[in-house]
Each structure stands twice: as structure tokens, then as C-alpha cells.
Amino acid sequence: MIEPEPSVAEKLFGDRIDVARAFTESLATHGEQRGLIGPLELPRLWSRHVLNCAVIAPLFSGRVADIGSGAGLPGLVLAIARPDVEWILIEPMVRRVAWLEEQAVALGLSNVEVVRARAEDWSRGAILDGVTARAVSALRMLIPLTAPLVRDGGELILMKGTAAPNEIEAAQKQIRRFKLSDVRVEVVGEGVLEEPTRVVRATVR
């Protein structure tokens, strides 16, 4: 059974809560069948996935890419929560691209562009104000995929787990190579979510 909607969901999404409900219901209905989520995720779909992503929505502005968007976590969730931000969802797998495109249309997300590609195939240059990613790879591997897409002064805002400080330490070579500054872990949602969200933030220079 799908997890009942936590009361904090309406606080995080505000007047966008009905769109968030529609997305969550669709993911619950079709996610496992389409290989987007595992069979054990329904009892924690809101708390572990949707709200885990939504809580970081205030960190973004401008034009932002989500690398390896998959089921739309965090890309579609963030596009729902922040209709004022332009979101580019980059995903290489055909069936996941189809899902992202279907959901963007069904949910009326005019602020979403879906691009079928790997991050390393991005050809538009360093034009983005920010890049995010969730559960893609270790930071030392993720930095070379994400930093080249971001303009000077833009940000990486990468969702990570409790090992984030260790990942930063292991990625020092890549941090220097791509001239990242102010690299830090931020914990978002303390006192709001039972399990707050951790992100690694860094400025691209």
C-alpha cells in the first residue's frame, strides 16, 4: 500500500499540492511496472522520495538540469514545487525519457524540457545556473559530469547521503580540477522531515 500523505506535504508544495498528489499517485500506480521504483518503495514513497526531493526546492533559481532524472526524482518533483525555475531533465534511457515526457504533459509542467542524453554528451556548453542529481554516482565521478554544464558562478546542488563528507574528501582532485569553491554539506529539512535531506553544494568558477 502507498504511504498516506504526510501532513507536511501541503506545507512544502503549497498551492502546487494537487499536482504533487497527481504525480505521486501516478508513480505509485505505474512506477514498479515501468521499472522506475522498486517493489518496497510504496510504503515510503512520500517521505523517502517525494518530500526528500521537495524540501530542497528553495535552493534553486534560473535554469537547472537534473542529471539522470529517472523517475523524476528530483527533477519532476522540483519542477512541480518551483514552476518559476526552468528544468532540463537529462536521462539516457528510452523508457524513462518516455515517462518523464508523459508526466510533464499530464501534469502541465511547461517549465520542463526532457533531453535524452548522457551528461557527458551535453553540447550546449556551460549555460546552466545549477545542476542537481540524486543517487547517480560517487561525488568524484559526478563532478566531471556536472561541473562542465554550469556557468561561472553557478552551483552544483547534489543530493547525497550521510557519507557526504567522506565523498568530498575523496573528490579533492576533481574539486581542484574543476575549480569548485565553497564546497560543503548542507542538511535541509531538519525539524520538517523525519529524515532530512543532505546536499553537497559547490560554486563553479
Image (cartoon, rainbow, N blue to C red):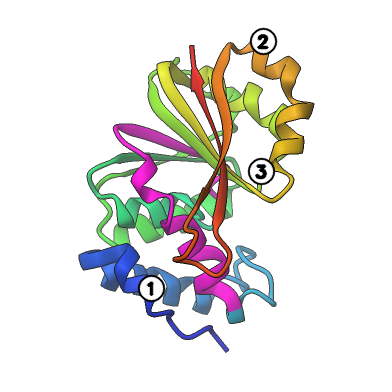
Q: Secondary structure at mark 2?
A: helix
Q: Which mark is residue 64?
A: none
Q: Nearer the viewer, residue 94 or 90?
A: 90
Q: Earlier in the sequence, mark 1 or mark 3?
A: 1
Q: Nearer the viewer, mark 1 or mark 3?
A: 1
Q: Secondary structure at mark 3?
A: loop
Q: Nearer the viewer, residue 72 or 58?
A: 58
Disc 1 versus disc 2: distance between alpha carbons? 40 Å
Q: Residue at x 44, y 35 (%)?
A: 65
Q: Residue at x 29, y 32 (%)?
A: 62
Looking at the image, can residue 96 be seen?
yes
Q: Secondary structure at mark 1?
A: helix
Q: Residue at x 68, y 70 (%)?
A: 38
Task: Tell me the residue that label 1 is attached to.
Answer: 8
Q: Earlier in the sequence, mark 2 or mark 3?
A: 3
Quarter occupied by residue 32: bottom right
The segment highlighted magenta reads 44-69
- Residue 48 on image: x %, y %: 57, 67
Looking at the image, can residue 124 be seen?
no
Q: Which mark is residue 177?
A: 2
**Quadrant of the drawing holding the N terminus:** bottom right
